[in-house]
Amino acid sequence: WEFYKKRNTPGRLWSKEKIKQVCRPYAQRDKPLFLPLLSTWGAIRDLAGPQNACTMLYDDPELAREIIDWQSELRREYLFPLVEQLRPEILKIGEDCCYNHGMLISPKHFLDFCGSAYREITDLARSVEADVVVVDTDVNTTNLVPLLDQWGVNGCYPVECKAGNDLFALRKRFPEFVFFGWLEKEVINEGNEELMEREIQSKVPGLLKTGRYFPNLDHSLQPMCTFDNLCRFLTCLHKTTGNPLGRFPRSVS
């Protein structure tokens, strides 16, 4: 850990003038600005793998806290000044802290180890009037969303389908939350063409009526997808949303 930390901690900070200079091109933007802010427990998982990252909370909690605190220190030193200067609309934390039946670590551990970092981030978000603080985490987020809502986070993605997420139920519980995804990626795979329209029509119109929903696939495309199917999917989604914006190859069929 010490070897890794020494080689992955950035060097000298930019001056305030340098930060202003780099941020100046974004001052008159006409699109939302998205800024990632590292992680908490997710950093341990990246370093040690899911199993070791889970057991470390019991076997070596001091090391776990040190890694999470290191992420917080990097945010304060190197990223918070950029947030204050840029005032982005969207701040993002990457965690990947869930699996197909729920969270990889207990809600108690997540509150204990990660709560202060999240509170610091959401306090900053309010101070710069950021519209969305979103967490990137895969698989089943049913037990995580209430914790994020408690801290002032108001977004989560990609809301995967096969993990048992029910976005209609989550929307009822958290009407102010912003959700992204929940469209099964496998409908774009070769041979699944007949599933596309049903997948979109059964979810998108109802969720759009509730607001705060961005319809999208629930994860990256798979190798079995085809370009023609992607065009069909996007064309159907475009018609369903009635969105006049967006450029992509349309299906002619």
Image (cartoon, rainbow, N blue to C red):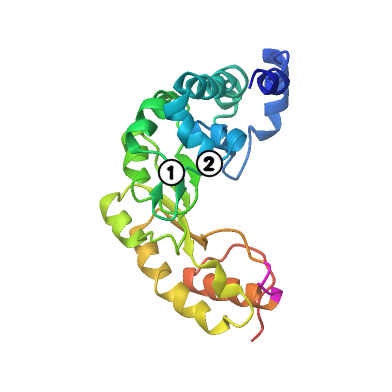
Task: List x then y, in percent, for residue 17.
Answer: 70, 15
Q: Height in image: 162 above or below 59?
A: below
Crowding at dot 2, Cα within 10 Å, few <14 / some 14-19 / many 20+, comes out as some
Residue 130 vertical position relative to residue 20 in the rendered view, above or below: below
The residue sitting at 30% across, 51% down in the picture is 175
Report x, y in % for residue 196.
Answer: 52, 77
Residue pictured at 31% horizontal, 42% vertical: 146
Outermost residue toward the left in this view: 173
For mark 2, what is the residue? 50
Look at label 2 and name its amino acid: Pro
Note whether residue 125 is visible: no
Spot occupied by residue 134 in the image (x, y as percentages of width and height): 47, 42
Q: Which mark is residue 120?
A: none
The quarter in which the C terminus is drawn is bottom right
Please determine whether, in this image, residue 49 is positioned above or below residue 158: above
Q: Is residue 128 left or right of residue 111?
A: right
Relative to 195, does residue 38 appear above or below in the rendering?
Answer: above
Q: Main secondary structure of the magenta part?
A: loop
Quarter that holds the N terminus: top right
Q: Could you tell me which residue is drawn at 55 percent across and 37 percent down?
A: 45
Are dots 2 and 1 in contact, CB under 8 Å?
yes
Location of residue 194 in the rendering, given as x and y in whole percent from the top left corner: 53, 84
Q: Disc 1 marks which residue?
A: 104
**Image side of residue 118 versus residue 246, left or right:** left
Which sits earlier in the primary sequence, circle 2 or circle 1? 2
Q: Which residues are magenta?
A: 223-227
In the image: residue 29, left or right of residue 141:
right
Q: Residue at x 56, y 20 (%)?
A: 70
Residue that lies at the very extreme toward the bottom in this rendered image? 253
Q: CA distance from mark 2 to mark 1?
A: 8 Å
Name the foreground residue: 142 vs 172: 142
Between 234 and 18, which is closer to the camera in this rendering?
Answer: 234
